[in-house]
Amino acid sequence: MRYLLSGAAGFIGSHLCERLLGEGHELVGFDNFITGAKANIAHLVDHPSFRFEEADAAGATFLAEARTWGQFDVVLHFASLASPKHYLAKPIETLESGSTATRNMLELTRQSDAKYLVASTSECYGDPLEHPQKETYWGNVNPVGPRSCYDESKRYAEAMTMAYHRFYGSKTAIARIFNTYGPRMALDDGRVVPAFLEQALTGKPLSIFGDGTQTRSFCYVSDLVDGLLRLAHSDERYPTNLGNPAEITVGEFAERIRTLTGTASTIEYHPLPENDPQRRRPDITKAKTLLGWEPKVVLEDGLRETIAYFKTRV
């Protein structure tokens, strides 16, 4: 099959590239490198079935340029500023990735009569009043808070995707991605996994925001990629949670990192950022039922792979 992928040089995007090329597909990937890295796809650029373009899905000339790339069977929209550090620094670009870029990718989908998958997020649920979070939960999001540039960009992307499905009959899918980790996460990402690992491997104190009782659920990237591709080829049009339902407190996670890295790092506590969710755990009943999918990689095994990668980067 022939795929188009935005955000191809990002963390998840680069793993998607690897998986698709490994399965024998043809892939056109592009990135504007606002958060992606050339190093993430350096081992793939000479692959005979891979074409890479430096492009911005929200750019004024993007559609005209991308239409020269030919027809596609599947369009995957993963261009996004997904970490708080990045989206707080570039809120306008973040909103554009969910609005203008999403519409452009949907237009390319229409041109090819392709299947379409957009990477949404568990942040659509905000600081949830329902636990665990099911796809039917509408969320508890502050639309004008500091995190709203990211939360609302994804909620808008979902709305735009459903509008194209309803109005044009586009074959769309929406993945609500929960915390994912693995090799190729950026050291300066600001999210808890790279932050803890960078601190642990350099002997700095591990920074916990809040009292450490807030929870997260961590899914290894290979498990996520498997779920994403199953969803992309399904007939499900409404949002589907993809994540690991194994919940752990941030404090417990910090101790796990200290044990696995053997660091002597202490723990420092800092004020919790505004609107930071207190609990995060997906209900993946829908993914299990419709896709036959659930995570297989246990946390310790995934962290060992991730730690090995980070040791080459610090």
Image (cartoon, rainbow, N blue to C red):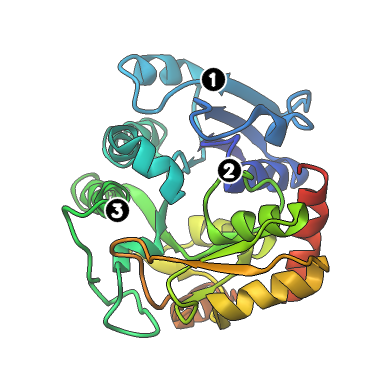
Q: CA distance from mark 3 to mark 1?
A: 28 Å
Q: Which residue is mark 3?
A: 147
Q: Position of residue 49 (x, y in %)?
A: 72, 29
Most foreground residue, 219 or 303: 303
Where on the picture, by quarter, is residue 125? bottom left
Q: Which residue is mark 1?
A: 54
Q: Amino acid at mark 2?
A: Asp
Query: Looking at the rendered structure, which numbered label has been put on residue 138?
Result: none
Q: Is residue 72 above or below residue 279?
A: above
Kindly tell me whether residue 81 is visible in this rendering. Answer: no
Where on the picture, by quarter, is residue 219? bottom right
Q: Position of residue 36 (x, y in %)?
A: 57, 34
Determine the residue positioned at 26% across, 39% down: 99
**Number of residues whose C-alpha sits closer than 10 Å to that of mark 2, classed few (under 14), some (14–19) or many (20 or more):** few
Q: Is residue 199 above or below residue 236?
A: above
Of mark 3 and mark 2, the one earlier in the sequence is 3
Where on the picture, by quarter, is residue 297? bottom right
Label 1: state its secondary structure.
strand
Q: Amino acid at mark 1?
A: Glu
Q: Is residue 263 above or below residue 61?
A: below
Kindly tell me whether residue 247 is visible in this rendering. Answer: yes
Most foreground residue, 259 or 97: 259
